[in-house]
């Protein structure tokens, strides 16, 4: 698949099954993350790859969060299962480094770009993914569970696996609705 086709046809895949990327395929995905734009070479990222029992560990962290945040029993039970929507979840964290020329927002954007790069590398190799955030990405219980500092952010949970079905094509948007020219 050429790069332009990949980018112009990008679509998240919410239904993912085994197998997840592994070996060289996973290494390619991880290397793609490390090629994200990175002003001043701060490498403002940290990634946690969850699979197998790691998904259970992530589910337990979500469960703890749901309990501590007063969720209903139904939501608590659901929290445990959320990571199992795919055979692999990569937690992407923006690790803030104080720097006079690179503000925090740019470092978060850099970490966000790493997620896009990982998903595109997965698609290029026959896999797919879904970038999710939600309340768990903002929850102090979850952030503490990952050992985040106060200025760090969870920028996403990238669910990866084999597509369960081919997604419907997305409608093409009119660029004139989103772009203007200053000439």
Image (spheres, rainbow, N blue to C red):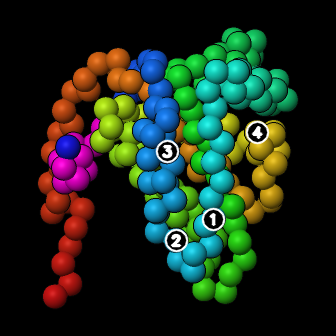
- Say whether marks 2 and 1 touch (CB < 8 Å): yes
**Mark 2: which secondary structure?**
loop
- What's the CA distance linking mark 2 and mark 4? 26 Å
* Residue 96 is one of the magenta-drawn residues: no
Q: Which mark is residue 44?
A: 1
Label 2 crowding class (10 Å Cα cut-off): few <14, some 14-19, many 20+?
A: some
Residue drawn at (72%, 77%), measured in percent from left and top? 98
Residue 179 percent location from the top left of the image: 22, 67
Picture layout, residue 117 above or below residue 43: above
- Say whether marks 3 and 1 touch (CB < 8 Å): no
Kindly report which numbered mark, 3 or 2, lies closer to the viewer in this rendering. Answer: 3
**Mark 1: which secondary structure?**
loop
Residue drawn at (49%, 45%), measured in percent from left and top? 27
Q: Residue furthest front?
A: 24
According to the picture, the residue beneath numbered tag 3 turns out to be 27
Tell me the quarter of the image containing the C terminus. Answer: bottom left
Kindly report which numbered mark, 2 or 4, lies closer to the viewer in this rendering. Answer: 2
**Mark 3: which secondary structure?**
helix
* Residue 4 is one of the magenta-drawn residues: yes
Residue 56 percent location from the top left of the image: 71, 21
According to the picture, the residue beneath numbered tag 2 turns out to be 38
According to the picture, the residue beneath numbered tag 4 turns out to be 142
Which residues, given as a range, are shown in magenta?
A: 2-11
């Amino acid at each position: 698949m050429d790069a332009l086709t990949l980018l112009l046809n990008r679509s998240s895949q919410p239904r993912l099954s085994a197998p997840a990327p592994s070996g060289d395929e996973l290494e390619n995905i991880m290397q793609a993350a490390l090629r994200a734009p990175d002003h001043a070479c701060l490498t403002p990222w940290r990634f946690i790859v969850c699979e197998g029992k790691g998904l259970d560990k992530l589910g337990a962290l979500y469960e703890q969060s749901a309990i501590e945040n007063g969720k209903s029993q139904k939501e608590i039970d659901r929290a445990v299962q959320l990571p199992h929507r795919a055979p692999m979840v990569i937690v992407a964290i923006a690790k803030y480094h104080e720097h006079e020329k690179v503000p925090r927002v740019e470092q978060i954007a850099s970490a966000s770009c790493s997620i896009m790069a990982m998903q595109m590398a997965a698609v290029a190799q026959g896999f797919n993914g879904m970038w999710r955030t939600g309340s768990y990405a903002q929850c102090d219980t979850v952030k503490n569970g990952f050992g985040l500092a106060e200025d760090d952010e969870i920028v996403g949970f990238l669910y990866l696996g084999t597509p369960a079905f081919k997604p419907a094509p997305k409608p093409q948007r009119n660029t004139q609705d989103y772009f203007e020219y200053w000439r």
